[in-house]
């Protein structure tokens, strides 16, 4: 009975919350807290959609706001921005509502994404892909979308920190509570809409009041007419949220022309000229999306029907929602260059009437104030009245504002230049810092290389010097002489190979190496190379295990380069393998991509995670190899990668603790290092 009364009690609490609060920031967190306590869960999330979503529609809901109530370690928290906890969940629930599933019930977020989707008897879906849920600090999730009048207006989600199987009773209770939450969300949304409308009206009133104040201030404080015009038009474009605004001034052929009565201007039946001869010039322009391009352009008043209409209608404005409808029925309709019908279909043209003339009953039309928009727009009566007031003050404002605008423009330009200068300096500093770091790194690499190269060059020389000294002994037996001659030959070959590696690497880098392509049997090729390593590794008791396909594996490539790659990888494996271990060499075909894959694995100290990204860099040697007196210059793997790339292939390396060998001490456990070379079976040279 206690659980059955849960929904009723929760509904009463929601009703009480609605009586006490009205804003989402107060209502939704309180509902989340009440639901969490009622269902005895660790977290509850209540979401509101600013724009309702149809049950059949798909995609993300618009304007989602989430609030959550959580309890972790006995501490209760209200999250006013629960996007991390709730956004993806509620979006998922919203998608379920459009597919016919009412409730999302997940017993364990860790295991659910890895299982196939299973639809339960009550329409829930537990196994669908919700991979991001496993990142939450909660394991059990129960949620559903809140619906009202066939539309989704929000969501309700319950979560527990431990895996939990949701009962049928809990799901039914969630449905009942979700209906009550849907009503609450709807009421909050309506209150929000009313508040938004009231704020919009108040904002519009304040905006227009501010605009009038600013323009009036301009009239009294700005002595420059050009500045005052520009400032006024910019403020108007911004206040009315239109694309473009212009101020047009009239220059009459007859300077004494006056508007004494409207009957004269509207024309007479006897054919008197109703419109005076005058030139219209664009003196100020402001645009919200392009640089002003009409300033200075002129046209005749008699060539623009819209200016004529405003002239004869003065002081009343001419407001057109879409001039294209008028022009379409009158092909001979001529307008000025600024009245672009396709680009700016909506406009309002307000006559600028001289103030002194208006008081005396004789009006002088100074010009026009024009606002334009790129889409059809309705001009409200309040806007037109405001524009009439602005137009009445604008002629005076023209005489007082240009100097202030020039100063502001100069300050703004200098500030912009200073900002750009600071940005350039910051970029130069960052570039310099990066170059210094690179130089420091290169210097370290150079020092390490010189040290290694000096050691590698001096060691054979020292050995050869000692052998030569011993050969000079006259009493030296013949067998000893032969031994020292072998030492000389081996050390000389070692020195020669090192120099040859340096020259070969330079040749490849400058793309001067020539390829001699031929078709070879890779199985025979690998067997012929691997056979020499059993004797070389006898001291370390290493074994080489070669695994090749039974069928012949043909590859069209450069034999010399491929031989260097395989020999260097085997030599490298011999250096770093643990004594008594086995080195595995495999080759296999990859028919789907017409490639050959060669892998080489060995067990040993391995390659650290810090060294892996640089293992193929020139002169780079792994951490600690120098201290361990392991011979090498850091050129071998760099040369291998260069040869592989020259053969049109790729090489990768992995190194990690071996799972095959169990060791109580993780630090001393051997690592398995694997080099993988992928080569095309058919390599085409540049000359073919």
Image (cartoon, grey):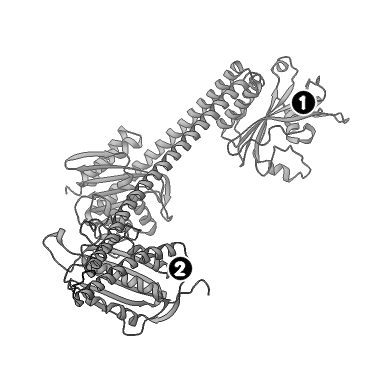
Dot 1 or dot 2, earlier in sequence:
1
Residue closest to the eye, 368 or 582: 582
Judge whether 536 appears above or below 421 on screen: below
Residue closest to the eye, 360 or 603: 603
Residue 126 appears anywhere in the view? no
Q: Residue at x 38, y 47 (%)?
A: 439
Give the farthest residue toward the left.
Answer: 664
Spot occupied by residue 342 in the image (x, y as percentages of width and height) = 67, 44
Instruction: Name the quadrant containing residue 643.
Output: bottom left
Q: How many marks?
A: 2
Judge whether 122 appears above or below 524 on screen: above
Query: At numbered mark 1, what does the secondary structure look like: helix, strand or loop?
Result: strand
What residue would you read off at disc 2?
A: 513
Judge whether 553 appears above or below 319 on screen: below
Badge 1 local density, few (<14 within 10 Å), some, or many (20+)? some
Instruction: Name the quadrant containing residue 484.
Output: bottom left
Query: At numbered mark 2, what does the secondary structure look like: helix, strand or loop?
Result: loop
Q: Residue at x 22, y 77 (%)?
A: 535
Residue 647 appears anywhere in the view? yes
What residue would you read off at disc 1?
A: 251
Real-space Cα distance between discs 1 and 2? 80 Å
């Amino acid at each position: 009975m206690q659980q059955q009364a849960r929904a009723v009690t929760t509904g009463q609490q929601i009703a009480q919350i609605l009586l006490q609060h009205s804003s989402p920031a107060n209502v939704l967190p309180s509902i989340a807290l009440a639901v969490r306590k009622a269902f005895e869960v660790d977290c509850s999330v209540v979401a509101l959609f600013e724009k309702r979503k149809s049950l059949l529609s798909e995609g993300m809901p618009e304007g989602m706001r989430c609030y959550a109530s959580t309890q972790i370690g006995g501490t209760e928290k209200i999250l006013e921005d629960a996007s991390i906890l709730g956004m993806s969940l509620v979006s998922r629930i919203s998608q379920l509502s459009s597919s016919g599933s009412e409730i999302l019930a997940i017993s364990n977020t860790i295991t659910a994404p890895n299982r196939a989707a299973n639809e339960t008897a009550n329409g829930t879906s537990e196994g669908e892909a919700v991979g991001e849920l496993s990142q939450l600090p909660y394991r059990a999730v129960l949620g559903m979308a809140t619906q009202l009048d066939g539309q989704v207006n929000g969501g309700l989600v319950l979560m527990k920190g431990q895996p939990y199987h949701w009962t049928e009773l809990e799901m039914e209770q969630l449905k009942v509570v979700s209906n009550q939450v849907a009503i609450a969300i709807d009421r909050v949304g309506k209150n929000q809409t009313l508040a938004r409308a009231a704020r919009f009206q108040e904002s519009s009133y304040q905006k227009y009041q501010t605009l009038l104040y600013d323009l009036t201030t301009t009239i009294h404080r700005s002595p420059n007419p050009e500045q005052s015009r520009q400032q006024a038009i910019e403020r108007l474009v911004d206040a009315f949220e239109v694309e473009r605004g212009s101020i047009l001034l009239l220059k009459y052929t007859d300077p004494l022309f006056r508007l004494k009565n409207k009957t004269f201007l509207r024309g007479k039946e006897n054919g008197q000229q109703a419109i005076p001869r005058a030139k219209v010039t664009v003196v100020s322009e402001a645009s919200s999306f392009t640089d002003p391009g009409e300033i200075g352009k002129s046209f005749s008043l008699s060539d623009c029907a819209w200016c004529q209409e405003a002239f004869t209608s003065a002081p009343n404005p001419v407001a057109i929602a879409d001039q294209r409808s008028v022009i379409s029925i009158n092909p001979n309709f001529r307008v000025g260059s600024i009245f672009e019908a396709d680009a700016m279909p909506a406009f309002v043209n307000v006559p600028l009437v001289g103030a002194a003339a208006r008081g005396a009953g004789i009006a002088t039309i100074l010009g026009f104030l024009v606002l334009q928009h790129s889409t059809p727009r309705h001009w409200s009566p309040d806007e037109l009245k405001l524009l009439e007031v602005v137009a009445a003050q604008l002629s005076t404002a023209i005489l007082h504002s240009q100097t202030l605008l020039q100063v502001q423009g100069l300050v703004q330009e200098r500030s912009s230049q200073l900002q750009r200068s600071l940005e350039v300096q910051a970029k130069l500093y960052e570039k310099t810092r990066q170059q210094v770091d690179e130089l420091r790194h290169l210097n370290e690499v150079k020092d390490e290389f010189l040290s290694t190269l000096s050691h590698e060059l001096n060691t054979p020389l020292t050995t050869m010097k000692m052998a030569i000294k011993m050969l000079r002994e006259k009493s030296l037996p013949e067998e000893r002489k032969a031994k020292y001659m072998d030492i000389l030959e081996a050390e000389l070959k070692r020195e020669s190979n090192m120099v040859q590696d340096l020259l070969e690497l330079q040749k490849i880098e400058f793309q001067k190496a020539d390829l001699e392509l031929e078709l070879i049997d890779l199985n025979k090729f690998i067997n012929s190379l691997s056979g020499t390593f059993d004797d070389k590794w006898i001291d370390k008791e290493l074994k080489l295990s070669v695994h090749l396909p039974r069928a012949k594996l043909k590859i069209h490539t450069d034999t010399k380069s491929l031989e260097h790659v395989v020999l260097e990888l085997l030599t490298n494996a011999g250096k770093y393998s643990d004594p008594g271990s086995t080195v595995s060499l495999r080759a296999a075909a990859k028919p789907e991509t017409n490639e050959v894959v060669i892998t080489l694995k060995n067990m040993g100290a391995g390659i650290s995670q810090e060294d892996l990204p640089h293992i193929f860099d020139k002169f780079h040697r792994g951490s600690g190899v120098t201290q361990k007196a392991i011979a090498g210059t850091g050129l071998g793997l760099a040369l291998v990668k260069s040869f592989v790339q020259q053969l049109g292939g790729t090489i990768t390396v992995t190194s990690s603790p071996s799972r095959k060998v169990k060791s109580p001490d993780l630090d001393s456990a051997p690592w398995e290092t694997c080099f993988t070379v992928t080569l095309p079976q058919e390599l085409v040279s540049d000359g073919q």
